[in-house]
């Protein structure tokens, strides 16, 4: 039912999205046993990372609240690492190469 609703919404906006993306979104929306919205009051607003929450919406509010309560961000996700300009640990950024020259 959720996938059909997502598809109808996207069709109404004349957007074409692969069904695999819709399956993933519906899995995230229902992963905690109840249907959660994707917006700031649902899935996106419950992220543990300060910067990931701030990247979505109401940036100042998230940063101000985190500063007041002394919250820390350990930069473990993609969004927060992009924000601070660090390489993300995906694809070619997920491996470390070491070269030991022969003597």
Image: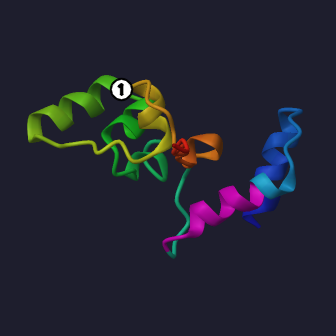
Q: Residue furthest front?
A: 103
> Residue placed at 10% from the left, 34% from the top?
68
Q: Is residue 97 magenta?
A: no
Task: Please name the residue that numbered disc 1 is placed on.
Answer: 59
Q: Is residue 69 above or below residue 23?
A: above
Identify which residue, 74 or 13, lies in the foreground: 74
> Residue placed at 11% from the left, 40% from the top?
70
Q: Is residue 28 above or below residue 84?
A: below
Identify which residue, 2 or 26, lies in the foreground: 26
On the image, the x and y values in percent for residue 71 come to 17, 43
Give the quadrant of the N terminus: bottom right
Identify which residue, 83 or 52, lies in the foreground: 83
Count neighbours of disc 1 (C-alpha within 10 A) and say few if under 14, some if 14 to 19, many if 20 or more.
some
Instruction: Kindly indicate the quadrant of the structure image that contains residue 19.
Output: bottom right
> Residue placed at 51% from the left, 43% from the top?
103
| Prevalent SS, magenta region | helix
> Residue placed at 45% from the left, 46% from the top?
77
In the rendered structure, the answer to whether residue 27 lies left or right of residue 20 reads: left
On the image, the x and y values in percent for residue 50 come to 31, 39
Write the start and end of the magenta stretch as one range: 22-32
In the rendered structure, the answer to whether residue 14 lies left or right of residue 70 reads: right
Q: Is residue 93 above or below residue 85?
A: below
Q: Is residue 24 magenta?
A: yes
In what element is the residue under mark 1? Answer: helix
Identify which residue, 98 or 5, lies in the foreground: 98
Instruction: Kindly indicate the quadrant of the structure image that contains residue 72.
Output: top left
On the image, the x and y values in percent for residue 52 come to 41, 39
């Amino acid at each position: 039912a959720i996938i059909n609703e997502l598809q109808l919404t996207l069709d109404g906006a004349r957007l074409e999205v692969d069904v695999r993306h819709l399956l993933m979104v519906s899995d995230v929306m229902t992963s905690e046993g109840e249907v959660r919205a994707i917006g700031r009051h649902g899935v996106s607003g419950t992220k543990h990372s300060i910067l990931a929450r701030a990247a979505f919406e109401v940036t100042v509010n998230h940063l101000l609240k985190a500063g007041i309560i002394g919250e820390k961000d350990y930069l473990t996700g993609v969004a927060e690492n992009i924000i601070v300009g660090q390489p993300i640990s995906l694809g070619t950024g997920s491996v470390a190469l070491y070269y030991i020259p022969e003597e």
